[in-house]
Image (tube, rainbow, N blue to C red):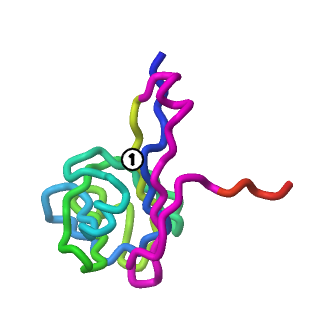
């Protein structure tokens, strides 16, 4: 059996551009792509914290250290500059692989600069 598991997450980045008349994709600061392990042209899911929109597109590389998160093409209807989004990529793993796998979780500051990474989400208190 193959399981769809979270591969990587870039948590709570701020959208810097929404370009409706640009070939569809999401441009992501290259440092964030490298830190997360998300590859250029890889399918990504974007969850907009501000308006609840969820959509799928693919990643393209923006300049390293630029802080750019540009939602492009039709997806630009789903996010506006200033919106906070979560960007995720998933991988299909066997049950044996999934038992050993840890996702890469990337966290940023207000300017979309990398602050730290983790490999697990803390459990919430009941």
Rendered position, 78 above or below 16: above
State yes or no: residue 30 in magenta: no
At a point 52% along the width and 60% down the height, the residue shown is 118
The residue indicated by pointer 1 is 89
Q: Which secondary structure lies at badge 1?
A: strand
- The residue nearer to you, when weighing 109 against 51, is 109
- Residue 99, image x, y percentages: 56, 30
Name the residue nearer the viewer: 3 or 44.
Answer: 3
Residue 49 coordinates in the image, percent (x, y): 53, 65
* Residue occupying image coordinates x 46% and y 23%: 94
Asked if residue 65 lies left or right of residue 109, the reply is left
What span is in magenta?
93-121
For the C terminus, the image quarter is bottom right
Q: Does 19 appear above or below 81?
A: above
* Residue at the (13%, 57%) spot, across then down: 23
Q: Position of residue 100 (x, y in %)?
A: 53, 34
Q: Nearer the viewer, residue 7 or 111?
A: 7
Q: Tell me if residue 114 is in the magenta stretch.
A: yes
Q: Position of residue 110 (x, y in %)?
A: 46, 83
């Amino acid at each position: 059996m193959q399981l769809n598991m979270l591969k990587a997450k870039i948590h709570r980045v701020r959208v810097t551009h929404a370009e409706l008349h640009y070939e569809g994709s999401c441009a992501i600061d290259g440092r964030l792509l490298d830190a997360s392990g998300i590859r250029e042209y890889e399918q990504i899911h974007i969850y907009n914290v501000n308006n609840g929109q969820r959509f799928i597109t693919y990643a393209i590389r923006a300049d390293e250290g630029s802080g750019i998160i540009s939602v492009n093409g039709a997806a630009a209807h789903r996010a506006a500059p200033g919106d906070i989004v979560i960007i995720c990529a998933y991988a299909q793993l066997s049950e044996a692989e999934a038992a050993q796998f840890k996702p890469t979780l990337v966290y940023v500051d207000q300017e979309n600069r990398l602050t730290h990474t983790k490999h697990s989400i803390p459990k919430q208190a009941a």
